[in-house]
Image: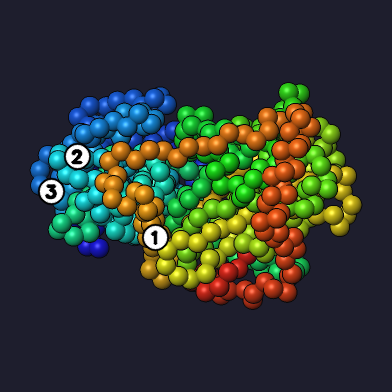
Amino acid sequence: MASAASLPRLALLTLAMSLAAAASGDTTTTTTAAGLIRVNCGAAVSATDSDGRTWDRDDAPSSTAGGVAAAASYEDPSLPSAVPYMTARVLDSAYTYSFSFPARRPGRVFLRLFFYPASYAGRAAGDAIFGVAAGGVTLLRDFNASQTALALNAAYLVREFSLNVTAAAGGRLDVTFTPSSDAHYAFVNGIEVVPVPADMATKPVPTLANGGRPDPMPIRADTAFQTVYRLNVGGTAVSPGADSGLLYRSWDEDSPYIYGAAFGVNYPKDSNVTIRYPASVPPYAAPESVYASARSMGPNAQVNLNYNLTWILPVDAGFYYLLRLHFCEIQYPITKPNQRVFYVYVNNQTAQAGMDVIALSGGIGRPVFADYLVVTAPGAGQTDLWVALYPDVKTSPEYYDAILNGLEVFKLQTYDTNSLAGPNPPLPDDNAAGDGSRARPKKKSGAFVAGWAGAAGGLVAVLMGCLCAWAICRRKTKAAIADVPKNPAPGLHGPTETYVFSVTAQK
């Protein structure tokens, strides 16, 4: 990709940002909206989306250098809002949006890119193949939004990255779009830049779970991340406007990723339980609605001992991934340690044994999260990332069960190539001939059981689902510590095999 310095550049906004508390790493504060940037690309006027967010007009010139502003030929009814998806900046050559933050210390931001693959100015959606680079990192390479939307059965795409705005870059973030060839073009519908607290994803320091001999595995402070999944486990989707800390994240429901028919039981918090964030878990870690709902294995101990509650998450092979699992006990009678204790498995390896949410958090209604670092095997294409829970019976807990409230998966950049780019997902056979202009969103399945209180009525269905999943594939319920490979070299220079690391936010 050509150097950003040699490309046409648009100085869209120069904003004074007052984020001293967040930049200092004070995890007890919430973030602030100061310094937010939202650009409705291709739009001539500012507008507000359905979530109440204001988007500035695109000041790019209507010239060859700045591409052209164009309107989408068709508005898919599943779009959450016409803004920013119904206008686009269409580019025939490399082009850079430049965002300056002169009053802010170097720090971390969310960069979100919004894509609606449709026909623009008579150009076919499938001809938009391009790369995106920002902050010295390749974010997307030969990205085909049309093919990706078809593969995901989605009408629109949002790609979220976490990047550092560095002093070496003059406090400026350059985002460069480059068509992959003369026959292709680039486009973008919306760009959002949101300041985030320092070390939000890099602290605490991960450690290798290797049979009682943990070694610190720090993630470099300048590491770039891509958000791959952000799930409200056991709950409903959370829109950006309902997120905490003014971070404007989207949280999806988890049911499409649960393995087999063994959905377990999803339920809300008891009405007399209050979510109280401890000092180690600031409110911006996840919104209250994430901690106020959960999914467990169910009330029947014998059933729970015969299956793993498992999520399967397709990811790009050959990258490191940071998994953040959010926990909060929200229903009585779970109020004391050793009432519910369980294993956490990642890719059929033990990431953590003896997970006791009450012991870790300090009480009912108190959130806590745990981070695990995993490396996928090298290779091209996609692979499945498995996250599974199973009761840990060694301490004879009162209930043989497991619980999860939220799950985030972040892809880490490769340091040798400074890249987050993966391949486009393969097209399903029945959509291979489509152009991607009217792809439909993925349908979400409903909750399996309304709540713990109603679990008895659905026990037969749960039991049948569990037995079905068990008959298909009874997975290992313990992973031998001896099978965990040796530590990779410090600094995470590149994946070679599959490793699992873990860290837990302490109360």
Residue 120's label in the rendered image is: 2
Q: Could you say which quadrant of the image residue 275 lies in?
A: top right
Q: Amino acid at mark 3?
A: Ala
Q: Looking at the image, is 12 positioned above or below residue 487?
A: above
Q: Position of residue 122 (x, y in %)?
A: 14, 40
Q: Secondary structure at mark 1?
A: loop
Direction from residue 81 to residue 393 in the image, left or right: right
The image position of residue 73, as x and y in percent, is 21, 34
How many residues crowd around disc 2 within 10 Å: few (fewer than 14), some, or many (20 or more)? many
Element at label 3? loop
Say which quadrant the N terminus sits in.
bottom left
Q: Is residue 16 visible?
A: no
Residue drawn at x 64%, y 74% is 485
| Spatial separation of the CA atoms under disc 3 and disc 2 | 18 Å
Residue corresponding to mark 3: 65
- In the rendering, at what x and y percent does residue 141 appear? 31, 59
Name the quadrant containing residue 218. bottom right
Q: Amino acid at mark 1?
A: Gly
